[in-house]
């Protein structure tokens, strides 16, 4: 993950700049304006500023994990997926794995018809 922006703690000690998609950023800014904001510097970048004192810890962790998944090399994201059971963002769950409802996904057929 060399030279890839993930997150940065700002000088105030309460704000973190975190990488997010532009669409996600717009939703966060609209839904929780006390927790998420922008400055002119970050406006052209796919990032948002997050106030740690205002954001729910679970939301902060989720955004950080999403940012990591986007920045991580595919092999590292896949290794993390195998440990956690969560598919990498944008990646379908492997065939034969369980769905969110606990049912098994059909495995790929190896026979031809």
Image (spheres, rainbow, N blue to C red):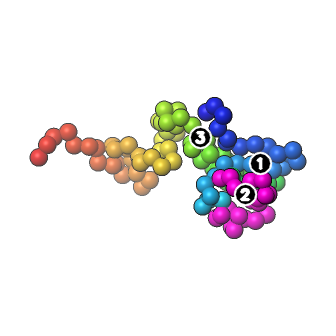
Q: Earlier in the sequence, mark 1 or mark 2?
A: 1
Outermost residue on the right side: it is: 12
Q: Residues within 10 Å of mark 2 (few under 14, many from 20)?
A: few
Q: Which residue is mark 1?
A: 16
Q: Is residue 108 above or below residue 50?
A: above
Whether residue 87 appears in magenta in the rendering, the answer is no
Whether residue 36 appears in magenta in the rendering, the answer is yes
Q: Find numbered disc 2 in the image and state the secondary structure of the residue it sits on.
A: loop
Q: Position of residue 8 (x, y in %)?
A: 75, 43
Q: Position of residue 107 (x, y in %)?
A: 28, 44
Q: Which residue is mark 3?
A: 71
**CB-based contact (under 8 Å), mark 3 and mark 2:** no
Q: Is residue 64 above or below residue 28?
A: above
Q: Earlier in the sequence, mark 1 or mark 3?
A: 1
Q: Is residue 83 left or right of residue 40?
A: left
Q: Is residue 32 left or right of residue 68?
A: right
Q: Earlier in the sequence, mark 3 or mark 2?
A: 2
Q: Position of residue 74 (x, y in %)?
A: 49, 36
Residue at image position (68%, 52%) is 45
Q: Find numbered disc 1 in the image and state the secondary structure of the residue it sits on.
A: strand
Nearer the observer, disc 1 or disc 3?
3
Mark yes or no: residue 11 visible: yes
- Quarter residue 112 falls in: top left
- Quarter residue 71 falls in: top right
Mark yes or no: residue 83 visible: no
In the image, which residues are magenta? 26-46
Please give the label number shown on residue 43.
2
Q: Find numbered disc 3 in the image and state the secondary structure of the residue it sits on.
A: helix
Query: Mark 3 to mark 2: distance in Å?
Result: 20 Å
């Amino acid at each position: 993950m060399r030279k890839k922006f993930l997150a940065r703690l700002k000088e105030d000690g309460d704000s973190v700049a975190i990488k997010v998609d532009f669409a996600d950023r717009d939703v966060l800014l609209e839904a929780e304006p006390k927790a998420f904001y922008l400055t002119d510097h970050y406006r052209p970048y796919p990032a948002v500023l997050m106030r740690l004192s205002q954001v729910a810890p679970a939301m902060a962790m989720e955004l950080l994990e999403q940012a990591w998944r986007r920045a991580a090399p595919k092999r590292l994201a896949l290794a993390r997926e195998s440990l956690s059971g969560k598919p990498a963002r944008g990646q379908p769950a492997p065939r034969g794995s369980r769905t969110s409802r606990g049912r098994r996904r059909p495995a790929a057929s190896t026979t031809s018809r």
